[in-house]
Image: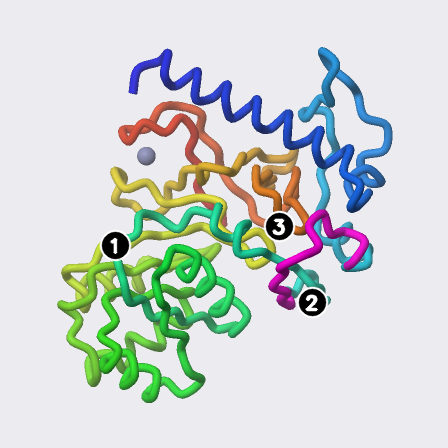
Amino acid sequence: MNETRLSSAKNRKLERLYDFIEAIYHSKESSFYKSVWGNVNPKDGRIDYYSLPTIDVKHIIQHEFDKRLYVKNGLFVKVVYGNDIPFLIAVTKDSIGQESYGGILCQRPLVSFENSHESIEKGLWFYGKNIMPLAAEDNLDITLMVAERYGVDSIVGDTESIKKLLSKAERYIDGKKITSIILVDFCFDADCNGSLKKYFPNAKITLVFSLSETGSLGLACEEKADGQTFHPSENTLIETDEHGYLVATQLIMRPTPIIKYRTRIKIKMEKKSCFCGSELSFSIRN
Ligand SMILES: [Zn+2]
């Protein structure tokens, strides 16, 4: 990609960002962000995104669920834990459809997360793309037996769940038939990755950096084999706060949008062109 094309893509994203912030600020559905932001600084007649404060899980927990909804219809609601306190997060089929989980290389995915809400939600992502997912059962043997009968061609899940599947997969599934594995998590285990490559030699492995409350935020670079370098997803902006914590904004009209959301994950950011064309990389710091 040449520089002019890169900078115009960057400008379009910025333009979308400023429009998005205006829409949220003037929304009649909710004043959640307006109350958190207080007096906003206009710059060239628009709200200056870079001067807005961050929010974190505490802001979400403190606001009643209904009062922080910018979209009120067609919600799928799930329970998320933040600081060990359960709270509600909603998605819509449209909002989850705008998240990025990599290129689609499958028709019959097995979706298996430790938390069943996650399995249903990620299943919705496939469903929205006319792909019929198979949701995992609590019983591992039944899950794998059914997966074999359904003819799954891919597996989508978090590290814990996929590790469990791996422990018994050999008994039920021909690993060579799996063409795609999508690992969705916020920390990744090199050993697990190694085992996946060994047992599923024909599968393309996609690592998706994702939090339960935000969904996909970034995808591991396909050019760098370290599995630790991520690029922000198409509709996501990644920054860090002064302590190095990841701050995310998604240009997606989620029921409760994610704008300058400060996570508890420390990252290292690098602003330089990667081999793959991305201009920004981040890696998770321990
Ligand atoms: Zn890259």
Residue drawn 21% across and 83% down? 172
Asked if residue 284 is among those painted magenta in the image, a careful observer would answer no
Give the amino acid type for the residue marked by disc 1 in the picture: Leu
For the residue pair 146 and 168, the one nearer the viewer reads as 146
Give the amino acid type for the residue marked by disc 2 in the picture: Asp
Which secondary structure lies at badge 2?
loop
Residue drawn 78% across and 58% down? 66
Does the beta carbon at disc 2 come under 8 Å from ligand 1? Answer: no
Residue drawn 41% across and 51% down? 208
For the residue pair 21 and 93, the one nearer the viewer reads as 93
In three-dimensional space, the C-alpha distance between marks 1 and 3, rounded to whole angstroms, equals 32 Å
Instruction: Pick whichever of labels 3 and 2 is earlier in the sequence.
Output: 2
Does the beta carbon at disc 3 come under 8 Å from ligand 1? Answer: no
Asked if residue 75 is among those painted magenta in the image, a careful observer would answer yes
Q: Which residue is mark 2?
A: 84
Quarter of image, res 249: top right
Q: Which residue is mark 1?
A: 105
Q: Where 266 falls versus 83 (above or below)? A: above
For the residue pair 10 and 210, the one nearer the viewer reads as 10
Counting every numbered tag in the picture gives 3
The residue segment tinted magenta is 66-79
Q: Which residue is mark 3?
A: 264
x and y, in percent, of residue 57 in the image: 71, 53
Which secondary structure lies at badge 1?
loop
Of circles 2 and 1, the one toward us is: 1
In three-dimensional space, the C-alpha distance between marks 3 and 2, rounded to whole angstroms, equals 13 Å
In three-dimensional space, the C-alpha distance between marks 2 and 1, rounded to whole angstroms, equals 36 Å
